[in-house]
Image (tube, coloured by chain):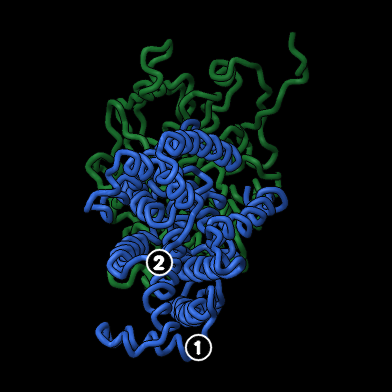
Amino acid sequence: MTTDITEAMCAWLPVGCPAIEVEGLSFRYRTTEGRGRMWTLDHLSFHIDVGEILGIVGPNGSGKSSLLKILSGLLSAGEGDVRLGGLSLGKRSKADVARLVAVVPQEYAQVFPFTVAETVLMGRFPHRTLRWWSMGIGDETANDLAHVHDAMVDTDVLSLADRLVSDLSGGERQRAMIARALAQEPKILLLDEPTAFLDINHQIDICSLIGRLRAERRLTVVLVSHDLNVASQYCDRVLMLKEGRLCRIGSPDETIRPDVLQLVYGCEVVVDAHPQTGRPRVTMPMSIVRN
Amino acid sequence: MADFTSSWANSGALLTVHRWVTVIGGLLLASVAVLVLCLQFGATSVDVRTVATAIMHLLRADQGGSATLGTPEIIMVQIRFPRVLMGFFVGASLAAVGVTLQALLRNPLADPYVLGVSSGSALGVSLAILFGIGSTFLLLPVLPFFGFVGGLLALLLIYRLAQSKGRLPIHSLLLAGVILNAILTAFIMFITSIMEPNRSAGLMAWLMGSLTAPGYPALGVFAVYAVLVLAVLMHKAQLLNVLTLGEETARSLGVETEGVKKQLFALTALLTGAIVSVSGMIGFVGMVVPHAVRLLIGSDHRLLLPASALVGGMFLALADTLARTVLAPAEIPVGIVTALTGGPFFLYLLLWRKDRML
């Protein structure tokens, strides 16, 4: 049974192929040309396996968000190649990418009164066909509604279906946004700072949700986070960026270390073991006051 | 499969075909009622029976038999009927432009008048009139074209401002619109000041936003034009929904946002150009109507767009009836009526309902 599901879930890519392969990726924004620092991302090469949770960390301006945008096809790679399921991003159509990759943006400010159900249903857009005669009214198939239902159940927002997104709390809204992404039936889920602006209760909530979704839907997850402890506790591997270069990639034990953090962030931190998981835990040193 | 369809999908959380048909059907009936009501009032008021006789006369297309009609019926057929219908179509178009601009700029206070798009169109039309292009034989298609070009340029400028820093806060965009409006209006004022007084008086009256009784060919052309553009906009309604998620999210859902935006810019500018060339600068319909409709039926543009168009049509037909009757037999420009009703509402939203919009 389990193997059946696994095979069906992995049908989008050849056996043994990583979910995402990045090879010699360099990128720069057109506007920064001719300035001191040329490359936003500089010769990155790594891969992400199916069902893995990869955390991308690094100082402000190290290129984390740009990398995430390239993985989702929002920015096109300047040099090098990004392959999803063995096929280059550039060779896939936008709709094709949208059926593979879903993005949960860092902040979501909806100014119009849309309900949660309406918002989640928008995630079905890449699976819908636009028809002239109906003007889009009643285009939702039973399949669309079933996927929306499942996505809302999985993220525990079903009871909020008819509430307005603008009326939700931060944690509820983040879950609704993840539901919207899940309705896309993605194989890869990209999250930009999923726990930013959330209190600790909702941080735990969202992190365990991501872990559960990975297990249940066999999703490949890439998340950008400023919170080193989130990366350490919830990610299988951590990728460290510094000034657009890949500084270190590996398990939390290999990457969340005082010497590596000193190198990447240029400051001293205390790293000890988490009392429950034994994974590295980062705290500020006692002498916070600096010259 | 679970019985979820009975739990949330039909409980108002989503737009259903049934709800769409009910709302649009109801609004169509209301529109007919409002139009008949508007036909009764004017410098001389008539009863419903006269309106019915006139409509029957029109439907029979019995132009030769006008001798059998009394004066009220002739007023009906030749003046009031085309004017009320024109008001309806202009109002519907204004509301549709408002809905589209609001989704495109993700700003619930966007309005072609407030953002200076109408001023751009008006400047285009004024220039055409100044150089005498409007007085040529090709009056009908030429003026809307100048309105289209002027409106499109203003719209692109406003959009550039909105995009300059990734996103522009709602209030900054409005401020930019106010400034653009002031600059464009200065140009228009300059044009009117260098014209001969008798021509500039007509231009000023038109600029204030006024409906006149058009001939049936002009009404027909505008109606067909407006309905066509509205139909295309309706087809884009789902894309408008997705665009409100933000541009990057829309792109991550597979929408070719650049192309869609260009089409929507062109469509709104086309419609604004046509509106301004027939009725001048009628403000606030495009902002007030969609806002009110959205509060009642939600944001799904598949319903919001046609519903706003119908309500906008009714609103302007009623406002124009007021403009025709309060000082009868004199008329006031309908733009003054809409500004006096819409302006305070706009201020209310801006000052007291900030929390709901930002």
Q: Amino acid at mark 1?
A: Val
Q: Amino acid at mark 2?
A: Ala
How many C-alpha atoms fall within 10 Å of the one at disc 2: few (<14), some, or many (≥20)? Answer: some
Give left or right: position of B132 versus B171. left
**Residue A217, image quadrant:** bottom left
Tag 2 subunit = B
Q: Are marks 1 and 2 on the same chain?
A: yes
Q: For mark 1, what is the residue?
A: B48
Whichever of callouts 1 and 2 sits on the residue coming sooner in the sequence is: 1
- Kindly identify the residue that appears in the image at 56 percent across and 41 percent down: B174
Q: CA distance from mark 1 to mark 2?
A: 20 Å
Tag 1 subunit = B
Q: Vertical placement of A36 versus A255: above or below? A: above
Task: Locate residue A194, reporting x and y percent.
Answer: 56, 43
Task: Locate residue A274, reporting x and y percent.
Answer: 67, 36
- Kindly identify the residue that appears in the image at 46 percent across and 47 percent down: B201
Q: What is chain A's hue in the picture?
A: green
Task: Locate residue B339, reporting x and y percent.
Answer: 59, 55
Residue A281 circle label: none
Q: Vertical placement of B106 versus B96: above or below? A: above
Give left or right: position of A221 versus B45. left
Q: What is chain B's hue in the picture?
A: blue
- Evaluate whether residue B328 shows in this view: yes
Q: Quadrant of the N terminus of chain A?
A: bottom left
- Kindly identify the residue that appears in the image at 67 percent across and 42 percent down: A276
Q: For mark 2, what is the residue?
A: B213
Task: Locate residue B51, reporting x and y percent.
Answer: 45, 85
